[in-house]
Each structure stands twice: as structure tokens, then as C-alpha cells.
Amino acid sequence: MFQPISRALILALVVFLMGCGTPPPTPAPPSAAPIATPMPPATTAPATAPAPKGDAANGAKLFVANKIACDGCHDASKPLPGGEFAPNLGNIATAAEQIIKSPAYTGKAKTVAEYFRESLLEPNLYLVPGEGYTEKDGSSGMTQDFAKTLTPQQVDDLIAYLLTLK
Ligand code: HEC
């Protein structure tokens, strides 16, 4: 007659079977070079975000270009507050947000980009407080004729660059 299988034997069998259960890893078939499936064209930026007009990389070049020489007065590697001849611009995109919200601000800009345009083209609308930043007659120490000497594209590029200085 059949003998009841001992528990120990069952356990041994289970362990044995479990060990065998894992099939050896099948080597991946030599994969043919994947055929590039053309991706659907990436959807363009949401319509709400208007493409920036200015070219920041070109703005950075203009900032140090001989004839414009913003860097002759401004240091864009150091943050505000500070700056010997003119305010430092290293964090101007962040600082400008505070400036246009402050009760001391006398200009017309509602956005940081507008503030930069105003600083460049109508520097006297708002004078950054600071020793040496204002001429004896009370006008801005900033070059006054950028509205005439810079092209609209150069102004846009410079603004795009200033917007990167956070
Ligand atoms: C002759 C020196 C001089 C040059 C060159 C000059 N700036 Fe200025 N800039 C100043 C002074 C001084 C001020 C601060 C007085 C004021 O508020 O207008 C100023 C203010 C600014 C401000 C506002 C800064 C702030 O802290 O809110 C910006 C932005 C600026 N300049 C950008 C530029 C750019 C971009 C150029 C080059 C196209 C440039 N500046 C060229 C002297 C200069």
C-alpha cells in the first residue's frame, strides 16, 4: 500500500522544483538595427507663450560689443545691490520684478521685459537709487541715446539677454 509521503520529502521536492522553475535566460536574438520610425512632429509651444522676439545669445554679445559697451559701466557677473559706476546686473531679471512692484518705482513698466526696454530707451523715467548713478543735473548716468543708436532688433536681443540674468 502507499505510504504517506513524508513532509520532509514534499519540502525537498518543492525546493527542487522551485530551483528548476527559472528558465535559463534566453539570449536576446541579434537585434536588427532598429528601423527609425519617424516621430510625429513635436507639438509646438503652447499658443499662450509667445515666442521670444529677441536672441539672448546675440544680446550677450552686444552687451560687450565695442560700440555699445554696456559692460563698460555694468558688471553682469555680480548681483544687486552693488555696482561702482552703474548697478550690477547679475540678478537683474529677479531684482526688476521687485523694482516694478515697489512704491518707489516711477516708471511705466508692467513687466520685467518692459522695464528693460524702458531702462534702455527712457532711462530717466526711473532712476535706480545709488551713489554715482545719477548725473549732477538729476538725469540717469546711463547712456542716453540708445533709442537712436540701437536697432529695434538689438534692443530685443539685449532684453532677451537681460531676462536670463536671474
Ligand atoms: C555710461 C555708463 C552706462 C552704460 C554704457 C550703460 N549703462 Fe545701464 N545704467 C547706467 C546707470 C548709471 C544706471 C542707473 C541709473 C538709472 O536708473 O538709469 C543704469 C541702469 C540700467 C538698468 C536698470 C538697472 C536696475 O538696477 O534697475 C539696466 C537694465 C541697464 N542699465 C542696462 C544697460 C544695458 C543693456 C546697456 C548697454 C546697451 C547699458 N545699460 C549701458 C549706466 C550705464
Image (cartoon, grey):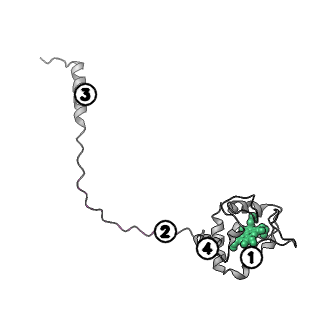
Labelled disc at residue 15: 3
Task: Mark 1 and ligand 1: say if the CB distance to the nearest ligand atom is below 8 Å.
Answer: no
Q: Is residue 163 left or right of residue 132?
A: left
Q: Secondary structure at mark 1?
A: helix
Residue mark closest to the camera, 4 vs 2: 4
Looking at the picture, which amino acid does disc 1 mark?
Answer: Leu
Sequence-wise first label, 3 or 1: 3
Residue mark closest to the camera, 1 vs 2: 1
Labelled disc at residue 43: 2
Looking at the picture, which amino acid does disc 3 mark?
Answer: Val
Callout 3 crowding tier (Cα within 10 Å): few <14, some 14–19, many ≥20: few
> Picture coordinates of residue 31 (x, y %)?
25, 57
Q: Secondary structure at mark 3?
A: helix
Q: Do callouts 3 and 1 mark residues in contact (Cβ within 8 Å)?
A: no
Q: Secondary structure at mark 2?
A: loop
Sequence-wise first label, 4 or 3: 3
